[in-house]
Amino acid sequence: MASKLCNPCGVSDKDVEAVNICIECNENLCLECSNHHRSLKATKSHQLLDVSLEKPTSILIRDHCEIHPSQEYQYFCSEHAGLCCRECLAEAHWTCEKVMTIDAAAKNVKQSEAFLKCEEEIHHIHESYLEILQRKRENENEVKVKVTDIKEKVKTMKSDLIGKVTRLETATLSCIASTAHEIFEKLDIEKDSICAGAKEAQDYLSEIDFMKKHGTDKQIFLLCNTFSHYTQRSNEQIPNLSARMNYFSISFDEFPALLSSTESFGTISIEDSPAICSFDAYKDCQAPVTATAQYRIDSFQFRNKFDIKGNEINGIAVTDDKKVICYQHNYIEANKALLYSFDGKYLGNIKLKGDPQDIAILPASDLAIVTLQNKKKYALQKINTKTMKTEHLIQVTYPVYGIDAKNNDIIVGSGDEVKYIDDEGLVVRSVDGKGTSPTFVKFGSNEDIYYITDSSLYCMNKEEVIKMIYICDQFLRHSFTLDKYGIIYFFLENSKGLYQLDLKDEFPDMLTVIPEVEISKPCFMCFDNSSSKLFLSDVTYGVAIYNCCSTIH
């Protein structure tokens, strides 16, 4: 390392090696100048450090007034919680009673709650940047895995298309590579921005660590004031940065009639959706706000659909491992539950022991429950979605129509009541519908239960109070669902459109039609757990899937 030269001697064009540094004056001093520095009245209280103890960052402490740049900060006004110079004191603080010198205000600041809170807030900001960066890295790894999976899928297809595989493989792999490259370029741009913020936060932490060990109270006090500008800016930037982040994915949709295709194995596309990275400002850390309170779905983008010929598709549910399970009414053969991948690949089926009413997935499990009716008898059929085998057929003595499950609760609409049951069909408790006839029931974003009659939408809260939310004579009892943000979606009789109703209003008064979604003969619908995809069953052909685009509100 090159030796550092004494700054005062440099003014006289002398090159003398420095041995100390004064962090208050920000000057390197030789031995002689160090002795003078210690003896002068104005500087004898300054702390001199060995010149090898270099500051870890170049962050500058603001010791001069922003309004009067030629003046140093000398006072602190407690009434306005701000630093001021002599001119500020004369112009704006001459009537303030709680004005003291910085030296007095900075006494014992290292042990003050304000300094400790400042350090904790910078730590929080730094950790927030690192968390967002980690999500970007995870996203990058997921894309790499997806790319690998798609390449393997392409190689499998290659063996069935020997005659034309070479040209098609080259074209498809090239498309994969260019698409992945495009994603990585976008990820690199976002990561650079995150890394810059994390680096800046790390610099502040290093400054704090250095000043804790070697800084004077005055310097630390000034440093705290400097930090306030940074933390205010960061607390505004991080939510904006998080809101602008996109979560990328890569998908491959093979062409069903590949042998007749001469251009490509399939289409390669980028799937991106807002990466929901919630940021809680430090002051709110003890009572964090959930991300779902800030986001809602603003638009839907058609992803794909798949036909299920010869079957009238009704109920539909989505498993945690990204499979679609639906049931159909077949008036010739036995009714069945059918399992498909999101891309429409058929995975299996199982016979149902009656006329299916509704279906629900038990949280954190591979089990689905179908409610059945056979003449005047009712049953619950538990299905393992991994093996597509019946785990248990449970005969029950009460009517069952709609079913939903959330956390540890399972509910069924029983006509006159809503029944809470366990996974063996035993009734835990019953809630009287008070004449509202709850049949098809859904959990809301909290513990409230929603259901639709022929003309009304009702909410039953956890205190068992029932409130009518909306009246419409075109409601369909079974054709509704809720997203995780508390918005209800439904089809209306003789309509091909999808409607939504915001339940955050105490008395919602407007139905909103979603223009991107149109189904010829809609039946059932559901979201996946993250509300990132909407699944719709159409009586005439099968299942349609839409990507959900969420933004901050």
Image (cartoon, grey):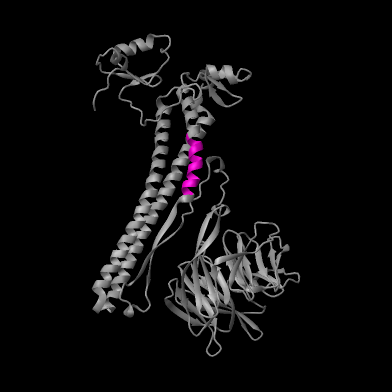
The quadrant the N terminus occupies is top left
Picture coordinates of residue 21 (x, y %)?
Answer: 34, 20
- Along the horizontal axis of the image, is 499 left or right of 195? right
Give whichever of 395, 122 is nearer the camera: 122
Q: Is residue 162 left or right of residue 487?
A: left
* Whether residue 65 is situated above or below residue 335 in the rendered picture: above
Report whether residue 428 is seen.
no
Decide if residue 460 is on the left or right side of residue 126. right
Where are the magenta residues, as a range?
A: 230-242
Give the residue at x 61% y 20%: 98
Question: Is residue 330 placed above or below 473 in the rendered structure?
Answer: below
Residue, x 43% and y 28% (percent of image)? 212
Name the spot of residue 405 as percent of width and height, x first.
58, 67
Residue 239 is covered by the magenta coloring: yes
The quadrant where residue 266 appears: bottom left
Q: Is residue 484 visible?
A: yes
Quarter location, residue 315: bottom right
- Give the overall secondary structure of the magenta segment: helix
